[in-house]
Image: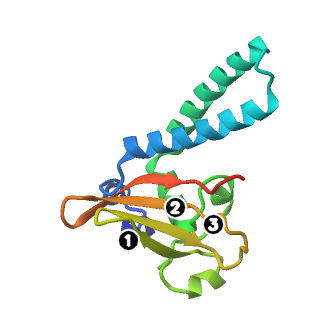
């Protein structure tokens, strides 16, 4: 998957991503963030609060559908960032497992196993000191293959 991202091979990359699961994961996370923000700022007695919430959820669905495309996911893996910062970063994807990439502003990846069939990769940017990290969740697909099924966004709290 990393080699396909580095080579900009969309077909090879797509073989390792479960886009429907990835979209559903992100829609759920963004919807939860939106509900939390709307709950903090709106009055439950306001009839427009429910309308705003419904419109927000519709926007989340369209936003995630537009953003979860092969070129966007590849760019995020190359930079270790998903969102506006990922779009501002430039350069080729290097071998992200080497510590020298941290000096160049590219992430190192750390890994955490969750059982036999799940692996979570966290981007670790040495230049940033905050603890908020993006987690890429890979699930076993067959015996030797893994698929990206979820992107865990950093906590906003």
- Place of residue 49 in the rendered image (x, y in percent of width and height, measured from the top left): 74, 19
Query: Do labels 2 and 3 touch, CB within 8 Å?
Result: no
Q: Nearer the viewer, residue 73 or 71?
A: 73
Categorize mark 1 by other alpha carbons within 10 Å: few (<14), some (14-19), many (20+): few
**Which quarter of the figure has residue 64?**
top right
Q: Mark 2 = which residue?
A: 135
Q: Mark 3 = which residue?
A: 90
Quarter the N terminus occupies: bottom left
Which callout, 2 or 3, points at the residue further toward the start of the chain? 3
Q: Residue at x 38, y 65 (%)?
A: 114
Query: Do labels 1 and 3 touch, CB within 8 Å?
Result: no
Q: Mark 1 = which residue?
A: 3
- Place of residue 93 in the rendered image (x, y in percent of width and height, measured from the top left): 51, 72
- Place of residue 153 in the rendered image (x, y in percent of width and height, measured from the top left): 58, 54
**Which quarter of the figure has residue 113?**
bottom left
Q: CA distance from mark 2 to mark 1?
A: 19 Å
Q: Residue furthest top?
A: 47
Q: CA distance from mark 1 to mark 3?
A: 18 Å
Q: Is residue 49 above or below residue 10?
A: above
Is 29 placed left or right of 157 in the picture?
A: left
Given this view, does label 1 or label 3 mark the residue nearer the observer?
A: 1
Q: Residue at x 38, y 71 (%)?
A: 3
């Amino acid at each position: 998957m990393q080699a396909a991202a580095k080579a900009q091979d969309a077909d090879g990359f797509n073989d390792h991503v479960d886009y429907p699961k990835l979209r559903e994961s992100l829609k759920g996370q963004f919807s939860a963030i939106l509900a939390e923000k709307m709950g903090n700022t709106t009055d439950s007695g306001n009839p427009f609060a429910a309308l705003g919430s419904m419109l927000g959820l519709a926007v989340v669905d369209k936003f995630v559908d537009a953003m979860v495309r092969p070129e966007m996911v590849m760019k995020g893996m190359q930079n270790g960032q998903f969102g506006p910062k990922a779009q501002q970063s430039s350069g080729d994807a290097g071998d992200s497992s080497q510590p020298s990439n941290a000096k160049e502003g590219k992430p190192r990846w750390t890994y955490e196993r969750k059982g036999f069939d799940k692996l979570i990769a966290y981007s670790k940017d040495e230049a940033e000191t905050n603890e908020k990290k993006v987690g890429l969740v890979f699930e076993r697909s067959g015996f030797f293959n893994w698929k990206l099924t979820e992107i865990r966004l950093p906590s906003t709290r």
